[in-house]
Image (tube, grey):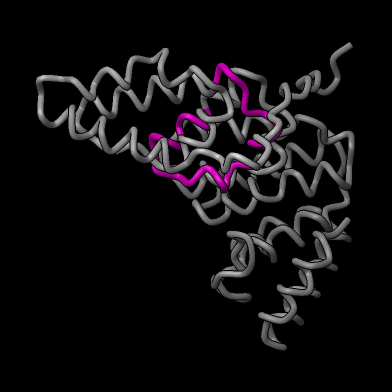
Amino acid sequence: MDPDIPMRSALDRQLTADARNWLADAVARVGRDSAAVRAAFPAVGRRCGRGPLVDGWTVADAARARLLAALPLRGAALAEEITALHRYGDAAEQRAVLRSLALLQDADASFADRGLPLVREALRGNDTDLIEAALGPYAARHLDYDGYRHAVLKCVFCDIPLDRVAGLDERADRELARMLADFAHERVAAGRDVPVDVWPLLHAHPGTLDACGLPAEAHSPVPERRAAAERALDAYAAAAPAPDSAAPTLGPAPTPTAPAGAA
């Protein structure tokens, strides 16, 4: 298995000749002996570089993904190896593992949801790079309804733009909109602004803003709350879809997959 061709091409363009040769040799060694990844994985940043690539990936992320894709392992054995790399790696190595989860499952269906504990661990922490990396296509496939909603809410709390969360158009539902509306009300009650990417999700579910009580804050006797409410309501109005455009269709979340090995 190998990462998708566009990213592979982008990576090859960024690597020096020496880096390309080192990576090709490392991939070959890992393909022959999975234990070789344990020395190669930490060395990637130094040998290949750490600069930006595409879609939030770095050169090191993509090079490490290529090493993981070369592992001659499947299912539980693959999950065990990448879990160890994650556990003993630094933040950059952990980010690469998280970004690679969907690629690994695409190439090996038996990998299934075995990487989900790594996603949940990242979501329990406060490293925004790891949270963002965890909320890629793999998390969108496997997090249950409640887990996905709370992950989105954590992004809002941590100022992670919601356009970096995979699957939001398909998985956002009315309950998530209600949670975001309550969050917006809490921010306004504290005299603080609300992230602008919350408003389109509330527009997709009419009534959620009124139900949370935020509009009433525009009449608050507390000047800071009143001003915050006025800003929020202006931003909500500005985010309204054009009259002649169809509202986005936000369907129900896909049925979460059963744990690997479950009967």
Q: Which residues are magenta?
A: 151-176
**Residue under the image location 30 percent in, 23 percent down:** 186
Does 76 sit above or below residue 165? above
Is 159 in the magenta? yes
Quarter of the figure that contains the N terminus: bottom right
Does 150 sit above or below residue 122? above
Q: Quadrant of residue 51?
A: bottom right
Where's residue 146, x and y in %? 59, 18
Seen from the viewer's position, the closer of residues 88 and 152 is: 152
Where's residue 30, x and y in %? 81, 61
Does 213 sit above or below residue 113? above
Predominant secondary structure, magenta span: helix
Does 102 sit above or below residue 23? above
Horizontal side of residue 127 vs 176, given as left or right: left
Query: Going by the picture, which residue comes out furthest to the front?
Result: 244
Quarter of the figure that contains the C terminus: top right
